[in-house]
Amino acid sequence: MTSDPDDAQLIARSLEGDEDAFVEVVRRHEAAVGAYLARRAGRELAEDLLGEVWVAALASRATYDRSFPDAGPWLFGVAHNTLRRHWRSRPAEEPVADMTGMASGWDPWTAVDSRVDAESVLRHALALLKPRQREILTLVAWEDLTVADAGRVLGMPPGTARRYLHQARMALRSAPGMAALLADHNTVKEAT
Amino acid sequence: MADEMDLLSGLKGVEPVRPRAFEEARTVLRAAMAVEERGPRTRRRTRWGTRRAAAFSVAALGAAAAVVAVVLAPASAPSRNAAASGKVSPKASQGAANPILAQLATDIGVEPVKLPGNATLEIRNQSPAGDTLGANGVDLYTDDGTYYWGPSRSILLQVIAQGQDTAEGEFKRDIAAALYAVNGNIGTARAKMAIANLIPGTKPDTAQAQQAAIRKLKAIDKKRGIPYTPPKPLTPAQKKEQTDNFIWMNSIDALTAAPENPQVRAGVLRIMATMPNVKVTHTTTAGQPALTLADSWPLLADPGLVESLVVNASTGFPIALFNTDPGQPLNVTYYHTFRVTLAAIEAGKFPF
């Protein structure tokens, strides 16, 4: 029984001229990368930037470390850099400003009456984090990456990524309003 | 006890990127690849995301061998004089149609048939006999062409509950084009089918889609400070083959979205009878007499790619689809369908 080629093998094939191999890599990860972009920049901009991410990935695929069979973290990294380039090209706007608009138009909190307050507290707490802390934290919490893979996205060693995550969690926990929010949340859970 | 990570996970949900955006992004990627001095591409079957996920395995290889093993006789040569496509004109394609497909379309009949239920549940897997849920998940097509997909029963239910047509109306347009083909002008039917995958008003033709992709590539290169190198334009013959590829793809989508509807089957076969490169062969597949319709696009960038649709020889009902491409593993998909009601599925009553 043969198995599907892994991403590293497909990227190797693409470097030998098999274009469909790279498109297959893109297909495998487009939903996750699209969601990554949408969470950070909103759907409209995510849709606008997605093609740019693939072109950047195509251009840099020769540098892909083929000891990693899963290209997901690498593509998240390309998406991350694409977003940074985009934000840099928009003067007077910081990435932090975009955090307030994350995930707009989608309501994952329909069962929580106080969702507006909760979201506001969380977004504010996120905005107070240092960019690298915030990125590691959200890569783990939203993209379901391991800490090591989240570090790979940002080009940092696993130990450093773990330190950033720890710092981010501590900072988030002590952010204004978080203690009350956690207490409320746990009270609601116990009551139900 | 919830912690800050649990709370943060509550913000994970996001308004999802639309399927057409994935396709547009891949078009940009393809255009970038074309800049690297490669030829124009066929539209591959894995069009967006997991719906067409390929499954490669030795088992699939064996299954495909079973598909093609019993070849009784070549049924027809490709009707090269049938109109190719390109800019499809209503006057096109009135020439010699493949007689076997044309006859089967006639035999199926054009009278509306009252079907049980109001939707078709479909499992695509690599087994000719078993309807086991596999990597391709489960498709649900309502009779009006609304499409839902999920990798499992539970996720399919969630998708249905959201009430969003996963295909953004694409199958409705595919089916409409097939129904038009039953009695309508075949050239017009081909023209409708060629663009059925496109959302009306967004991308009326391939040239516009390419132009949009090129504009985006120019903007990307400008950002990077590198000069833009334009891709080679398609020749007229390549354009014809590319359009032919679209007609083929969308026709198969119509057939697999409404396989129980004899009018859709007749319309699709009538269109396919005019496809210039299609070869039809009598086979036996999954224990039933079948026709294998093989199409190829030798002027495009995958000159060795042959995609084959296997249908029941008497009913035109889709049985399987497989690709052969030199140097690539064989990709085989078998279709297993059930008539259901949307309400029953929503209630969690699955027929498998």
Image (spheres, coloured by chain):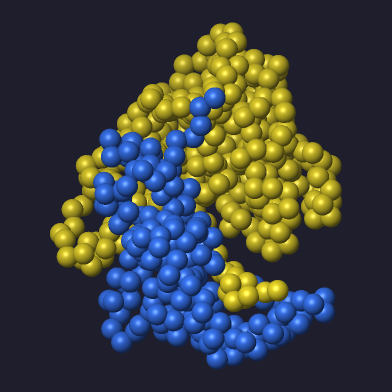
Q: Quadrant of the N terminus of chain B?
A: bottom right
Q: From the top left corner, tell me how far across and down residue B189 is, in percent.
A: 54, 42
Q: Residue at x 31, y 62 (%)?
A: B216
Query: Residue B131's spot in the image, x, y percent?
Result: 72, 33
Q: Is residue B86 above or below residue A138?
A: above
Q: Is residue B276 left or right of residue B108?
A: left
Q: Where residue A172 sits in the image (x, y, percent)?
A: 52, 81
In the picture, which chain is blue?
A: A
Q: Is residue B154 left or right of residue B205?
A: right
Q: Quadrant of residue B260?
A: top right
Q: Quadrant of residue B64?
A: top right
Near-viewer residue (A48 or B256)? A48
Q: Residue at x 79, y 48 (%)?
A: B118
Q: Nearer the viewer, residue A133 or A144?
A: A133
User: Which residue lies most toward the top here?
Assistant: B72
- Rendering coords of residue B187 (x, y %): 49, 39
Assign the C terminus of chain B to one quadrant of the image. top right
